[in-house]
Image (cartoon, grey):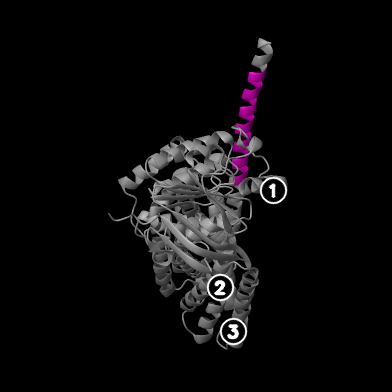
Amino acid sequence: MAALSLEFLQPAFMQRALLAAVLVGMSAPAIGTYLVQRRMALMGDGIGHVALFGVAIGLALGAAPVLTAVVVAALGAVAIEVLRERGTASGDVALALLFYGGIAGGVVTIGLSASASNANLLAYLFGSLTTVAPEDLRLIAILAGLVLAVTLGLSRWLFAVCYDEEFAKVAGLPVRALNLVIAVSAAVTVTVAMRVVGVLLVSALMVVPVATAQQLSRGFRSTLALALALGVVYAVAGVIFSYYADTAPGASIVVLGIAGFALVSALAGIGRTVSQRRRSDLGEIYEDDVVLEA
Amino acid sequence: MTRQPPAIDARDLTVSLNGRPTLRGISIRVEQGEVVALLGANGSGKSTLVRTLVGLVPAQSGQIELYGVPLERFKDWYRIGYVPQRVTAVSAVPATVREVVSSGRLARHRIGQPLSRVDQAAVGSALDTVGLAARAGENVAALSGGQQQRVLIARALAGQPDLLVLDEPLAGVDLTTQRLLADTLADLVAHGSTILLVAHELGPLDGLIARAVVLRHGVVAHDGAPPVAAGHHGQPGHDHVHPHDPVGTVEQEARWLR
């Protein structure tokens, strides 16, 4: 029984996929917490679109797609951050142009290149267990380590900037530099997660664990810690599920995550109702007392 | 005898917001240890002025010096405690009262430097000052509006600033909390803090303020003793329910112009 239940650990590609899932499960919610805090939960999605263009360039040139994607995604993230800082209505349209330009540019580039096929593209859109090559794993580990070092090491500074940017400015914090750190970390995370989750669903792994965690915690650091733990659970469980059910791992991870979110929401809702009822029960007792006294 | 530089020295400030001239040649000087209220009707430019003074809004012309250093070269931001005008202190991701107040300590830190015992003590004392020490571990969202305002004041106090700049600290705060904030500020003044605060009207702060600068249409209309509140506005316990009504504005302007 034990041998059967651990069978998914046998293939080398699964070992790599699971290791990547652990790294992605930690780094995606780590940066996602700041994106949610700043009400930019969809930023990861936008960067994902841009990253696809980077992937296409890598495939067309025969270079490592993760490497070209990280460069293009980082440039895209910096552009998004500059537009956000300006905060104008035309910036909103510019963001849309950037996102759609990224994904369309990616698809066209792949179409034009002789060596790459649409099948390759699909693996990057929704993730694939078999695409995590040994040389990818090392790069993923380094990049995920960087993201975690930054997001956890600078957590108080990043929190201050995301919580109240104006206060942070008056406190003399290097707000622009910290914003760029967030943008580039988000881009790196997208690239790290791309292999397992796919660029279209990367954002979900950044956001869903955070949305789940924040229903259970009172503080920022506890939300961050819980989101990291949930991210690892969702990512690993999703990869295992996808191995047995032969589904795209990204979609499996996200479906599991959303199920977890719904479950926690329901339980939290029941918890609130119970405590409210208990309070109103107490109220009734007091009312009874008043009646008796009268 | 060398004279201490003023905490704030701004000359001939001109600021336009969205192409509309908001400040039109304002000069204001706040000496160290002074407590100054910035008064005026809505749209008079008082909030824009403090935001310009702390560097959040660029001035088209004029000079600003903080503690004798031109704003663009000013580095000692830990000396400034800023309390922005906020409707709420609730964050998108939950944050505890202590986490928010602790972020006020970062002005005194290099990036990556961990919180020391001195920092913890300063955060604890800031929480004590605003009477929220018992709520430190709670989610800010669980607090009332007035308590959230106190969280933001504690955040500014945590950095142990020399100059406290408060933008409408009494807005949307009930009278009991207003009195508590007034006591807090009186305490700080007694300890030598310099304070510049924006207010719609002084209310419980009346006894604390020796000097008021009244703005009207982007220029200084009055600088000196606080104007005496007229009619029912002056009565203790008066609750200004509709600070934005046109009648109130006219009434207030009439008061400033006397």
Residue B87 seen anywhere in this rendered image of the structure: yes
What predominant SS class does the magenta segment belong to?
helix
Which residue has dot 2 on it? A124
Which residue has dot 3 on it? A109
Viewer-nearest of discs 1 and 3? 1
Residue extending farthest left = B1
Q: Is residue A267 magenta?
A: yes
Q: Which mark is residue B250?
A: 1
Q: How far across and how far down the image is residue B26, in percent? A: 53, 60
Q: Is residue A28 magenta?
A: no
Viewer-nearest of discs 3 and 2? 3
Secondary structure of residue under mark 2: helix
Residue at the spot 67% in from the left edge and 19% down from the top edge: A287
Q: CA distance from mark 3 to mark 2?
A: 14 Å
Q: How far across and how far down the image is residue A230, in percent? A: 50, 52
- Report the amino acid beneath label 1: Val
Viewer-nearest of discs 2 and 1? 1
Magenta stretch? A265-287
